[in-house]
Image: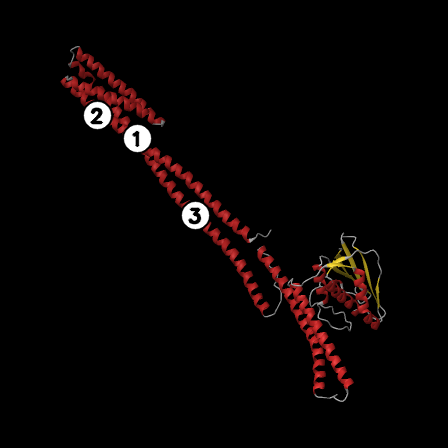
Amino acid sequence: MQLTIFKRLTLGYGVFVILLIGLGGYVSFQLKHLNRLTRAVVLQDGETVRQAETLDSMTGSLARFEKKHLVTGDSAFFTRFQEIRARFLENHATLQNHVDSERLRAHLDGIGRTVTTYFQLIDRERELMGEGNYRRADIYHDRKADLLEQIRLSLQAIMVQARQARDEKILLSSRIRVHVIRVGIVAILAGGLIGLSISFFNARQINGAIKRLQAKTHDVADSRFSTLPPIESPPEIAALTRDFNCMCSRLEELNTMKEDFISHASHELRTPLTAIREASSMLLEGCFDERPDRQRHLLTIVNGECERLINSINRMLDLSRMEAHMMAYAFKAIDIMTLMRTCVLKLAPIAMAKNVLLELTPCSGLPSVTADEDRLRQLMDNLLGNALKYTDSGGDVRITLQSDTQTDGFLRVEITDSGCGIPRSELNSIFDKFHRIDNGQDTERGTGLGLSIAKHIVRAHGGKIWATSQNGSGSTFAFTLPVA
């Protein structure tokens, strides 16, 4: 399957866009991951370290105020101790709710039990001091020190683990950033490579084809109408190449028709002009001053050749006006049989001179047709003139009229001859201007405009014209006209 340039570009840029969308999705996902890690570092691990440091600081404060109270017995120190104790327990509970690691929870649970034991010892010492046994309060000194050391060690372990988790998250964040940058660079390079590959591939194919078309265009400008070898891809260029080859073939055909027309026109114009020049020269030189009958004969020749020139030029002008849609038509209802009889009588002398039977088949009850009478006569003169021209002596030309059974509201006219016929390959082009068929017969060469003019006349009336023939067995020209 050959992809068009549009589909190739769409596919290539579609891949590029999909790649960018995928990259955007990947980056968005990783950014969300980075955001979660950053929040975890700041709000979880960092807060855990801060809370642990606060508890560690409170542990030292508890030890100091407890020592001062035991030494001095001042209740103010114990009040301060109680305030720190309440804050310690509150921060400990907050930290327990904050952490989500089982190991950290285990340490905090151990701290909770140790702190409970520590405060129980403090309360026991208070009881002993109340009973007057001040000296005996120091019996818990070593045990309290051990408990406080355990609390601090546990807090240090929590801080170490929180910092380690924070550092791991920061390292992971750094790795993710590096990976995102690498993936982005690779995706951009891959997308650029895809875009360059598509552009280069398309540009190479299009540029090569355009250069070949450009070279052939120069050949066409120099009247060399050779065709291009087929180009299969891309389809647009392939279609352009086919159209270009069709154009070259048509231009070559038109060039041939032009040369043929120039040859025919020069013959049509040169012959009467030569006759007019020679006759006028003889008259000017006074060759037949004493023979009026010869002078009259020369003037008759000049007049006839002038009529011939005028007819040829009028035919060319008529075709030009018809092609430019500038020909004026005066449509009216016409008795078709009366017009046909007039045309047959006009050309009867030519048929008699060639010993050709020219016959109009009578048909009664035919409706009138809507037509321009002068153009319809011109149409019949062209068709009957061609039929008589290509029919040998002893042949026949027949005209028949009937209602068109295939199309209501139209009348069909057929002109059938027993002439040389038309090759099948020529039937589609006989109505082209300047087109003549070289059938090998010694017939008078015309301008090749008669059938083209006939086609324009019939189409201007809203009808159709066509021809059927078998080479060597005669031809039939048929056309339709709208009934009035």
Q: Position of residue 263 (x, y in %)?
A: 68, 74
The residue sitting at 38% across, 43% down in the picture is 178
Q: Position of residue 99 (x, y in %)?
A: 34, 27
**Kind of residue sitting beneath label 3:** Val
**Kind of residue sitting beneath label 2:** Gly
The residue sitting at 43% across, 42% down in the picture is 24
SS class, disc 3:
helix
Q: Residue 47 bears which disc, if any?
A: 1
Answer few, some or many: residues within 10 Å of disc 1's Cα (few below 14, many 20 plus, some between 14 and 19): some
Rendered image quadrant of residue 120: top left
The residue sitting at 50% across, 53% down in the picture is 198
Q: Is residue 153 visible?
A: yes
SS class, disc 1:
helix
Q: Which residue is mark 2?
A: 60
Tag nearer the camera, 3 or 2 = 3
SS class, disc 2:
helix
First-in-chain label (3 vs 1): 1
Label 3, label 2: how many angstroms apart (C-alpha)? 55 Å
User: For the image shown, how many numbered marks are present on the structure?
Assistant: 3
Which scheme is used to colour this image of the protein?
A: secondary structure
**Front in this rendered view, residue 396 or 304:** 304
Q: Which residue is mark 3?
A: 186
**Kind of residue sitting beneath label 1:** Glu
Label 3, label 1: how many angstroms apart (C-alpha)? 38 Å
